[in-house]
Image: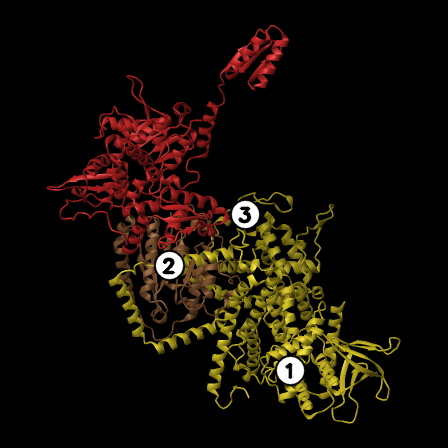
Amino acid sequence: MTSVQSKLYADDVSLVVVLLDANPFFWATSSISFSQFLSHVLAFLNSILLLNQLNQVVIIATGHNSCDCIYDSSSPPQTHSSENGALPALYAHLLQRLEEYSEGFPIRATPSTAPSEYVAIMNAIFSAQRSMVPIDSCYVGAHNSAFLQQASHITGGVYVKPQHTDGLFQYLVTVFATDLHSRSFLQLPRPAGVDFRASSVFGQAQGDASSAADRKRKAPET
Amino acid sequence: MPQVRIIAKSFMDMVASLPASKLDKLYQNVFICEAILRSLPPLAKKYVLQLLYVDDAPITAKTLEEWVLADGSSKHKVAIDRLIQLRIFTETVDRKKEVTYKLNSTFQSNLQKHLKNGGVLPREAMPANVTARLPSLDELGQYALEQWERFLLHLISPSQTDARTSFSSSMMRVFQRGLLTQRDKEDPTLTEGGFQFLLMDTNAQLWYIIREYISNSEERGIDPADLISFLLELSFHVTGEAYNMNTLSDIQGIMIKDLADLGLVKLQQGRKESWFIPTKLATNLSVSLSDSSFRKQGFVVVETNFRMYAYSTSKVHCAILRFFAKVEYQLPNLIVGAITKESLYDAFKKGITADQIISFLQQNAHPRVAEKIPSVPENVTDQIRLWEADLNRVEMIPSHFYDEFPSRDVFEAACDYAREWSGLLWEDSKRMRLVVKAEIHMNMREFLRGQK
Amino acid sequence: MRRRRGRLGLRAARSVREAEIGDRGGGASRVRGRMRRERRVRRKEGMERNQHSIPIDINSNPNQPTDSSCCVVLSNAVADHFRRRGGREYPYLNPEDWIAGKANMASGQVTKRVKYKSSVKDPGTPGRLLLTLEKLVFKPNNPNSASKLNMEFRYIKNHKYTKEGSNKAPMLNLTSSQGASYIFEFENYDDLQVCKECVGKALSKSVEAPKPADTSEVPSEQPTTEELLMRMNLLRENSELQKLHKRFVIDGILTEAEFWATRKKLLSGNSSRNTKQRVGLKSIMLSESRPAADGRTNKVTFNVTPEIVREIFAEKPAVRQAYLNLVPNKMTDRDFWTKYCRAEFIQGTQAAVAEAAEDEDLALFLKPDDILARETRQKIRCVDPTLDMEADQGDDYTHLPDHGIARDGSKDITDSQNEIYRRTLSQDLNRHAAVILEGTTVDDEQLRDTQSVAEALARSKQGHDSANEEAYANANQERLQRISQLMEIEDLRESDDHPLAPLSIKDPRDYFDSQQASVLKTSAGVETMKCSLSTREAYGSLRQSISHIKAAGLTDPIVTPEVALKVLSVLTQNISSTKFGLGKNPGESVLDRLPSAVKDELLYHWMSIQELLRHYWSSYPITTTYLYTKVKTMILFLIFIVAYNGKFKVDLLFCNLQHLQVSRLKDAMSKIDLQLQEMKESVQPDLRHQVTLLVRPMQQALDAAMQHYDADLQKRSARSGERPNGYA
């Protein structure tokens, strides 16, 4: 599989869709606490909005077996604040929604039906590849995720597994805050060992869907 | 070809040209830091963000360069230059000639604060129970547009009585500098620059005026830094919200009236208090000029038969169209005209170029035709260019004509001499006549004298 | 040339095998298994005689025959060494043994000092015996001696040897298929032992290919010669395939049949070429031939040949039906055709109307063909109702007077009266074309008899119709569904323009079976987590985190300057290290920067692993012993590859592999080990790290397979506690 050549972007306006992993089982065992993690991610989101007033951020929280869109900077209640770049409501609102979300976690008795999810995930990745939306993955789990590596690779995104989780923000800002326009001038971390044929043999597709915060970037519709 | 003299230089260019002490003072304002960050080239933004939490240790230039691909080296250079120019980066070269950069600490801590606290509004909006019914966003937009048009009309035809602004005539003259020429007793006419100004989109026009306004501020005893700072601050207000006038300083109080004339804010008076409402023009101040998402809707339809329909109520639009088209009917919301050879020749005579006309038509194409490619019929654009080329078919070169040479030798020597100076335009050896460029006439005369 | 020989050899081998079957009178499918069992029994009993059929390996790569085969021989020796020591196949592998095997491998052949005898009593010629897997060579010490020998093992039928402890000298007796015997006397029994094994392996190479007792699930049907040819062609054309084949089949990891079973498509794609082509019909319109007029009289002559009859019957089912109805009951064959020709002649004229009114049989020929019309209607009904045929109507000019091509050049006189008797040329042409495309079932022998032609055509038509009937019914059902779908008014429906196309998987099972391992793994993982942590606790701690940050805000500073600097420099370092040598091409990967040999090597290993994994996963769910064995084989090999990566993760799994033919695995293992070691050493130190990175996904894939195997094994042993392997 070859990765897509990224589109040429005329400006540095970004729509960043962040898939935030809020799987409680992962965070309960993780080396970095969820509040620390959130702290880094929120600061990162704010810096995206800071960079350009046209930038947009959408946050989707994924739980153990559900997911929900919890924040959209372009939705009406936030219109004023996002236009101004001053975001008094961002953190409070986002956290509020996240809390609501975590309370409303539906708890299913049986483990989720993985094959159907797998298809959905692969579909999403292939669609991203087709529509040239890079998927960046920042993986804070213990092992590398071959699945996310693959996803990032085929979509022309970046995969990073931070070594120092206390500097997560620095990773996010240094690598992932790079707009697509600038990516054609910059060298971003490129993982070794992804470009093998038919990596779909990898079995750990589902295992990796947890414990990652990966983000898709997309040029705004103009 | 007429040179484009009117360039709507970006606000940040003006900021960058401020003296260092004033820049440092500006950075104490969080909003200015934010606005300036947003105005930076993409790579520069990234560098600032990257170094935002690297406090003490300066970063070597090499560290940043590592990331740059060969294609991006020029962009990298531009970004770094801009950062240094704006004093966001301070560059130091140590003894080993290693270049290091350090982030301006005021700038840095302000942005850090912003990231942590999510930013705070420059001033509190007035509660709704104090203010009367505020204009809706649409009304406000309408208001801003009207104000701006009135100003433009005033600017280009000062004699029109219905277009009055509170700008002093001296101030208006400042604005008109470069746009209008006024001969004695005659009505002022637009210069080439003036036409180009009118063909620009609103944002660009606004920048031009604001720039003139700022550069003229010192004459009026206002510190340009204060003015810039206030304008930037204004751009962070919420469109449509009311802000109390008493939160403004005296100087700002004076300025806000001028800005109201330009349509940047709307002033309203309550029973006790008075307030200003920023319009979109104000909040867009820090947006980059090239951004098209704020461009207003187009209104012109051009047909392949050179007829032109402009759905507009604006007098300014009508005035602009008259520059290059023959307006036939003018209905309340529709201007019907034709692009003719004569109308275009008039335009060319005034110094408007074919490309300017075409780009105006394209940029203001009605949404119905804007989707089509091309939005302006090709035969029309081609013809406009051909007619322009027609005018440029004859090249005028001032020259001198020589004849009645005493002998063929002298004639030939003169030809050779002119050729040597590459000033020979034409020769007729039979009747011994030649034409030489005017610029070498003096040399030629000397030469011929020597021949005698 | 060699290839050709191999093929011929195969035929020979099969015939020999068949002969043996005849000897024993056993069932064909059981022969191999029995042979092996007998062999084993004999060996245990210490019988000296060992019988073999001639093994022929059609897959041996003629280009590089030696290196692989030597390797097999010697590592088999290692396996035998184990066997001897433990008395049974003890599967534990000692890495040192591999290395020992490797050392021997380097020499590539076995050379022993022997005496070559033509009979037992012959004093013998002293010399050296050189054995490879392919052939044996005897070089006498005296170069002038006539008793040289250089022959391939293919021609050797049997080998006998003297038993250690008997009074006889250590001797090896090889019998050729022609009956000649070659006797070698060794200096000691150890030499004999080594050579004996060597010969044994060489002879049994293809015989030893597995044929477990239960053959029900084993893909082992004998391939046809065509298929073999095709396989060889494929191998020749596809070097990657050839490599894989060499690695796994020739070295005995997979059987020939297993290897090809997963590549049926490749084979079938080619086989279609070879189907016998039937001769079609000529496209000339025979029945269109005009009558011959002599010019003097009004008499015209029609010439009706059997071919024309066939064509008429095929194209005009109404005429065929009329023939079957009328001839010979009502009229003779000749009368029928006369009438038909008359009808054709007057067709489209005024006379036709008049005559048709008088003669109903004639009218039959003039009328539009009902049967055809019915068929056409049926066909039209099958057309997708959503298809917009409106445009087609414009092409139909038949309703216009004097339009179209007039038959036989004369002006077409149209008359509303004889409208119904008019046929258009285009109709005829279309019908003719359709018949030609359909082909015919009537062969030339049948053509002689008009009656049988008519019947045959009618029959074939009927058969066709009844076969189609069901299809028509189905099509009709589908059609109705489609119409009902389309009946919905689009505007009223919720828009379903999903921006993403759904992934369509032809056979989901095919796809998901390979994902089984991960499913197991994930669910297992979730379960264990759940055990250690109650759901409530987990969610509670998550909520706590959120409220903590809500109360306290973001940590300040978000990143300490030291950490920020550290991260930045780590990232920058990473950039500068990968940047080295990389061009502008962002698609270029680390792989492209490796020396091409290393890159090829890595890709080759990756392909091998994929091949193994494919076989491994396709064996699940395990239903037969055969599959079980196969899985174990795969696992062993996979473990080996992991072991290469410096882990030496040889676990207890080996203990459970008693029923496995360990030898063929070990062979392949020691080989790949050597290759990988060499590769690793050849890589420059600065790239070694990257090679390790590249190898990691391989490891991960292997780990997944092995974990699944582990889990499966545990399940099995839990289910059948008394039998540790589930298969005793």
Marks 2, 1: nearer the viewer:
2
| Crowd around label 2: few <14 · some 14–19 · many ≥20 (10 Å) | some
Q: Residue furthest left?
A: B271
Is residue C404 visible in the rendered structure shown here? yes
Q: Chain of mark 2?
A: C
Q: Are marks 2 and 1 in contact (CB under 8 Å)?
A: no
Q: Amino acid at mark 2?
A: Glu
- Gap in angstroms between the C-alphas marked 1 and 3: 85 Å
C345 or B59: nearer the viewer: B59
Rendered location of residue B13, percent (x, y): 35, 38
Q: In the image, which disc is placed on residue C562?
A: 2
Q: Quadrant of the C terminus of chain B?
A: top right
Residue C51 drawn above or below residue C106: below
Circles 1 and 3 in contact, beta carbons < 8 Å: no
Which residue position is annotated with label 3? Answer: C398
In-front residue for pair C644/C628: C644
> Which residue, given by chain and number where applicable, does mark 1 sit on?
C79
Q: Quadrant of residue C439?
A: bottom right
Q: Name the secondary structure under disc 3.
A: loop
Relative vertical location of residue C149 with respect to residue C297 in this rendering, above or below: below
Check the rendered structure and report the hue given to chain C.
Answer: yellow
Q: Which chain is tinted brown?
A: A
Which numbered disc flags the more N-terminal residue, 2 or 1? 1
N-terminal-most mark, 1 or 3: 1
Q: Which chain does the numbered disc 1 sit on? A: C
Separation (CA) of disc 2 from disc 1: 59 Å
